Image (spheres, rainbow, N blue to C red):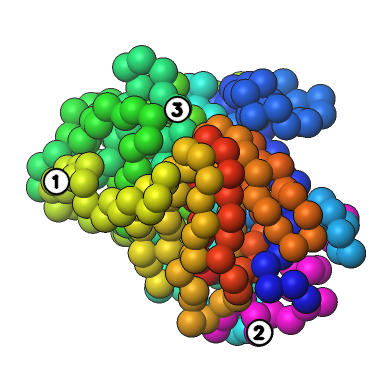
């Protein structure tokens, strides 16, 4: 096997009612007959949607089938134990506001859902004027107050409303109340999990005209009721490398995310994980070329690759990429 190997992935699409058309129109993905596309699961071994190998010896195989063939031991301790990847990557197009929600911690999810907890981070790929997110409470609150405010339709009054712009990033720990606002176009990196507890959904109806289900009791069980202070330090973790800059966006037990902004020609030695040989390589802006042993790989915004890297990687172009260590 080559020292470096890049394999292009094909996503799985989700047509939730709040989705739009950017995944098809901006990222130029073949979404078939779907009218709206809320999420594109780019790097996923989750049972509810698995990415597909797009090229090479394993074309047409799911990520789970690929790793069953090459060995889950190469993906670190989580993969060896669970036969699953520790994290997944999505593109999210919020044409409408998403529900106000929370994700459970590891212990709660395993006990109640037989799934993983869900810590996640958002990288804002683009944002329409006035776009925002909700993240955390803007004051200390309580279970009793949250219940009252859901009943009175005033829960938004006690949430941090944060304006967002292209290039912003946010880490959302499990237990943090949050929502993505309309007009946000996001790359989400999260634990491999599909557990979401909706607290409030603006009285929205599903496609069949029924109110969308809420999971208020479980949400109340896992919420962090303390005030969350939201701040951004633009200079924190920013490193310049030749004609590019890199910035560590998140470091967790399940994934580490580094952003590289390329303007010209760049050779990078991506931080090696002591646990996994594999990474996800996600293009979040622009286009360029990666010079790989098996030939040039043309990359553009919206493309996602499985990367096995053991030698410096050369990229040429004008683009921003996220490299996610497992």
Q: Report the Cα–Cα distance between label 1 and label 3.
A: 24 Å
- Say whether disc 3 or disc 2 marks the residue closer to the N-terminus: 2
- Whether pointer 3 and pointer 2 mark residues with C-beta atoms closer than 8 Å, the reply is no
Picture coordinates of residue 316 (x, y %)?
58, 44
Which portion, as a residue range, is magenta? Answer: 60-77
User: Which secondary structure, mark 3?
Assistant: strand
**Crowd class of label 3 (few under 14; some 14 to 19; many from 20; radius 10 Å):** many
Q: Is residue 230 magenta?
A: no
Picture coordinates of residue 183 (x, y %)?
44, 21
Q: Say left or right for 8 vs 274.
A: right
Q: Which residue is mark 1?
A: 229
Q: Is residue 262 above or below residue 75?
A: above
Q: Which residue is mark 3?
A: 126
Q: Which residue is mark 2?
A: 73
Q: Quadrant of the N terminus?
A: bottom right
Q: Residue at x 74, y 72 (%)?
A: 2
Main SS of the magenta part reads helix
Q: Say left or right for 217 vs 29.
A: left
Q: Is residue 62 magenta?
A: yes
């Amino acid at each position: 096997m080559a020292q470096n190997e890049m394999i292009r992935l094909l996503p799985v699409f989700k047509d939730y009612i709040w989705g739009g058309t950017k995944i098809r129109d901006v990222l130029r993905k073949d979404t078939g007959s779907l009218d709206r596309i809320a999420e594109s699961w780019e790097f996923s071994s989750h049972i509810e949607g698995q990415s597909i190998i797009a090229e090479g010896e394993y074309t047409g195989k799911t990520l789970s089938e690929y790793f069953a063939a090459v060995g889950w031991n190469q993906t670190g301790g989580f993969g060896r134990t669970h036969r699953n990847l520790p994290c997944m990557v999505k593109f999210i197009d919020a044409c409408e506001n998403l529900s106000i929600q929370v994700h459970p911690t590891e212990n709660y999810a395993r006990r109640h859902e037989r799934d993983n907890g869900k810590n996640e981070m958002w990288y804002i790929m683009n944002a329409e004027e006035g776009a925002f997110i909700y993240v955390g409470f803007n004051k200390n609150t309580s279970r009793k107050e949250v219940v009252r405010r859901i009943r009175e339709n005033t829960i938004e009054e006690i949430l941090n409303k944060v304006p967002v712009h292209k290039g912003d990033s946010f880490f959302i720990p499990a237990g943090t109340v949050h929502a993505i606002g309309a007009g946000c176009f996001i790359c989400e990196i999260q634990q491999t999990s599909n557990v979401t507890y909706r607290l409030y959904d603006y009285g929205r109806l599903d496609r069949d005209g029924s109110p969308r289900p809420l999971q208020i009791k479980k949400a109340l069980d896992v919420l962090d009721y303390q005030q969350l202070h939201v701040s951004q330090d633009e200079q924190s973790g920013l490193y310049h490398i030749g004609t590019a800059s890199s910035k560590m966006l998140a470091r967790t037990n399940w994934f580490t995310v580094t952003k590289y902004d390329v303007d010209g020609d760049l050779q990078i030695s991506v931080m090696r994980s002591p646990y996994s040989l594999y990474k996800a390589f996600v293009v979040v802006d622009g286009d360029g070329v990666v010079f790989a042993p098996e030939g040039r790989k043309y990359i553009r915004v919206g493309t996602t690759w499985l990367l096995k890297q053991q030698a410096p990687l050369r990229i040429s172009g004008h683009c921003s990429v996220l490299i996610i260590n497992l």
